[in-house]
Amino acid sequence: MEFLRPDGLPDVLEARAAHPGALPLMGGTDVMVALNFDRRRPDALLDLTRAPELTAWDHVDGMVRLGAGVTYSRVIDELATELPGLAIASRTVGSPQIRNRGTVGGNLGAASPAGDSHPALLAGFAEVELASRDGVRRVPVDEFFTGVKQHAGRGDELVTAVWIRPATGPQQFSKIGTRNAMVIAVTSFGLALHPDREQVGTGLGSAAPTPRRARDAEEFLGAELDWSARRDIRDSVAAEFARLVATAASPIDDVRGTAAYRRHALAVMARRCLSWAWAEHQGRRH
Amino acid sequence: MTGFETVAGVPSATTATGNTTTSTVDGVGTSPLRPDGTLKVAGEFAFASDLWMDDMLWGVTLRSPHPHARITGIDLTQALKLPGVFAVLTHEDVPGEKHFGLEHQDQPVLAIDRVRYQGEPIALVAADHPETARRAAQRIKVDYEVLAPIVDAELALRPETPRLHEGGNLVRHVRVRTGEENPTADVVVSGAFEVGMQDQAFLGPEAGLAVPDGEGGIDLWVATQWLHVDQRQVCAALGLPPEQVRLRLSGVGGAFGGREDLSMHVHGCLLAQRTGKPVKMVYNREESFFGHVHRHPARMHYEYGADRSGKLAYARATIHLDGGAYASSTPAVVGNAGTMGLGPYDIPNIQIDCFGAYTNNPPCGAMRGFGSVQTAFAVEATMDLLAAELGLDPVELRARNGFREGSRAPTGQLIDAPAPVAELVEKLRALPLPDERPDAHDLRHLPGGVANTTHGEGVRRGVGYAVAYKNVAFSEGFDDFSTARVRVSIAGGQPVVTVHTAAAEVGQGLVTVEQQICRTELGIDRVVVAPQDTSVGSAGSSSASRQTYVTGGAVKAASESVRRLLLTSAATRLGRRRDDLQLAPGGVVLDGSGTVAITLADLLGDDHVEDTVEWRHRPTHPIDPETGQGDAHVQYAFAAHRAVVDVDVELGLVKVVELACVQDVGRAMHPQAVVGQIQGGSAQGLGLALMEEIQVVGGRITNPSFTDYLIPTILDVPPMPIEVLEYADPHAPYGLRGVGEAPTISSGPAVAAAVRAATGLPLSRVPIRPGDITGTG
Ligand SMILES: Cc1cc2nc3c(=O)[nH]c(=O)nc-3n(C[C@H](O)[C@H](O)[C@H](O)COP(=O)(O)OP(=O)(O)OC[C@H]3O[C@@H](n4cnc5c(N)ncnc54)[C@H](O)[C@@H]3O)c2cc1C
């Protein structure tokens, strides 16, 4: 197996175009598992770690541009205020070792329905930056996931960054696992309140072939919430929101849980996340 | 994070006979460092997967993808063509016996014309690179005629079900009958329970290195639990005498029963014999799930009757254990589950039927707790049903009915050693309960942990109790001995003891205990543990909580013998009577007045004194096939747990808040290791209660990885207050009791009871899944 180690993003993108069979390697926390289990035997690996452009984050045009190679540990340490949903999600990823190596870009590259960053990115209306030798484009994250472990990036493109607006309101993330740490999501839920636009963002993980938003739930709740007077949410509204979240899912039965449990849990998480987020919006402790 | 406290109970008498050498530093009852401890902590200890020789080949196993199929053809052509391949072998290349097995010789070394479980070995490849060997194995063409798998132990036993083996699908039926045939009682409760298939989940995968000696014989370095039973089976398959098959223990990364059966042993040797080169085999994690036996899944129906005061009147139990495709140790597991399956309670009228069946599921065999783990879930849940029915405190019910010295086990065997069941549970009840709501703002204290599923919503607390008892050592008339060779010599002017056994150190710390015993018996600090191999007699298995008892007993006996030899030699040299001399700490012989008569350095010079002793515990006996009566067991170990859990009842997630244990160990040979065994066993039981299960669908394992076979992490294992009692067993060396298994037995049922208490749900199957609690399973 060849190991390509280009320096700097331009050379990385050159190599990407020149070696379409080469598997990109960032933190390696998915790639190495696939190699060890003999699930993948690529002709070459394309090491992305020598492109400093990928491992930085910055403020650009009022948004956070998060390099694809920023690790979960750094998201937790450096971006918990601006990207609270993503930071909560990052805390649930694997173990300290995995959080030190694993990256948001790698999570997107793997495009697993269980990827923990995805619900937070969906709820935060993030955009994925894709770059090739020939140019850069941005794809809304809910158009990025195209199928089970499939995404919208072309063979000559890489995920170079994620663009997210810093939080203007409370964000939450919940993840179900059958143990209290180091677990792939049985199902997960991300919620972001965007009071500036009076909009609600949601993201569902391990609930369908791809991570997805619960658009009906978002619209319903966006219209029902009393954004400015911040009055308490009626139970019937919370319940309907939870129901709409659960209905947005198309879960399956697998070794990690049943479809029925996933739907049920999504409804519970939706309700709880909403209550915590709204309490925060109201300035209460939750 | 485990704020445990160890409280020593009643001090036990140290059995010490004439010409004693009581204790020196780091002897019995202290907690010296393990001889391999520093290496292990530093990551420098060589495990079997680290074995290496420069010119070695790599062996790989081709396994069946089908749980049940006829093999209609095997074509090796393409595999043999691959450059780098040295050998490709099938059952035709097995020179000796084509079948092996611990109790029944029913398992093919390599499949012959039929496969009976997914993962059954069919062919072997040796190549100069592991990847080449894997590629070659993929090129072997096997034609199958796929057959319908039999995947249910009860169905397997029906007369109309096709037979998987010549003798039928019943491996063993144990029947226990005492008292009346149709007993009645004031209060009757019953339940049906199920236990899923647990895995040993040892971290060091199966591995070994087979090295041909150039003269037709072979040396095998391997991670195992019992060198001599391996040697017997390897010899049979290779058609070689024991002198030509020498086994040496390699670094063992955990065992828990999963290394009692052969894995790569014969395969590696076959490849080495054929190629004339050293061959290393090491399973990867996925293969490991197919490469060893698991804990038997169980289906159990229990009925207990009692009078209104809560005194047990009768018990009925029907137990089905799924043995999978081959017998392995199913007969002995059925023996344990059958004879001990009613818990440590006095019950006058008993009817037990315990069955072990062949199916096309993964083979099951030994795992820590061995038949008692499964039945304890049923027993303890039934006891709780009874307590609820009677309106009695669960501790009270257990204390009233618990075994005491003088009780009779269901086999009729007199319990002639301390059996402090009532004290165990009463001590647990007396322990303070943890805070109602610890720190609600620290998510790590809540169900779901940092996954942020609750901030207190839906969380209910529950407390549960359970008791374990477990037979120590091998039962039912098995000749269960161990051999120890102890030598005293002089190195650098100082006496040094060398202790040589074939007893497998699997992480439990037996090597430390051997050193401690030598120090205590001989008064010599420096004790070298020789590498374990088959050049000394069998030590029996590192299982059944038996090695400290049996190999410890052998080391003690050999040390005593060496002490006598030393004193005899000193007496001859000094012209005194042996009885007037004593061996004292520091390697000196004292006379009657306590004056140094001679030092061992002077006595021995360049010589040494050595003896080898084969040591046996008191004999056991087979049980009556109709009534199950007989003195089947050597010793019983007792432990009890109290679990405190918080359950998020809306999401079905569980946080074990505290898991307290009280255990009677007879004598804490190494108090720190005792606590370690209790902590580890408790965690393993917790795992079975809440998460650990090999999921099998249609005979196929659906989660053969640590991604989906979950074992508790540090955030799942709670603080464990531990109290250790030391009520000496008068029949055992130093009064000790085997420690390793009992805590694995009671912790799971206590956790399950606590979850039931928190939820109010019957929860009759473990592991308890979130879907079971939320009704969405
Ligand atoms: C023990 C363990 C626990 C884990 N726990 C979790 C968990 O709790 N939650 C979770 O979501 N995940 C978990 N994972 C999976 C993994 O850690 C995450 O998916 C992580 O985000 C991957 O990042 P990485 O940088 O290591 O990616 P890599 O392994 O380097 O790459 C992942 C995939 O993305 C591709 N890729 C990488 N970078 C790019 C890029 N810039 N552009 C295009 N494609 C790219 C790679 O080719 C590969 O297909 C776990 C993994 C392990 C081993």
Image: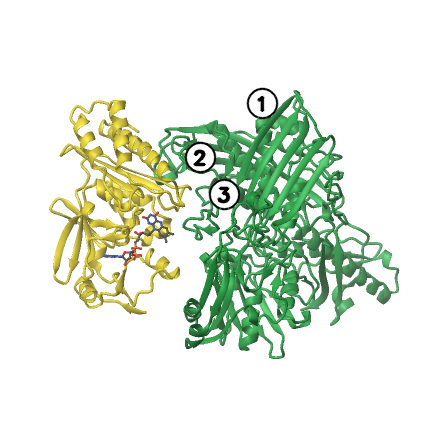
Chain colours: A yellow, B green
- Mark sitting on residue B687: 3
Q: Earlier in the sequence, mark 3 or mark 2?
A: 3
Mark 2 or 1 closer to N-term?
1
Residue that lies at the very extreme toward the bottom in this rendered image: B214
Q: Is mark 3 within 8 Å of ligand 1?
A: no
Chain of the residue displaying label 2: B
- Which residue, given by chain and number where applicable, does mark 1 sit on? B389
Q: Give the residue type that dot 1 points to.
A: Glu
* Chain assignment, label 3: B
Q: Amino acid at mark 3?
A: Gly
Mark 1 neighbour class, 10 Å CA radius: few under 14, some 14 to 19, many 20 or more:
some
Instruction: Name the image quarter holding the C terminus of chain B.
Output: top left
Mark 3 crowd level (few <14, some 14–19, many ≥20, 10 Å Cα)? many
Q: Secondary structure at mark 3?
A: helix
Callout 1–callout 3 Cβ contact below 8 Å: no
Q: Is residue A222 above or below residue A20?
A: above
The residue under the point 75% across, 60% down is B613
Q: Residue B567 location in percent, x, y? A: 81, 61
Asked if labels 1 and 3 share a chain, the reply is yes
Question: Could you tell me which secondary element the residue under label 2 belongs to?
Answer: helix
Q: Nearer the viewer, residue B304 or A226?
A: B304
Q: Amino acid at mark 2?
A: Asp
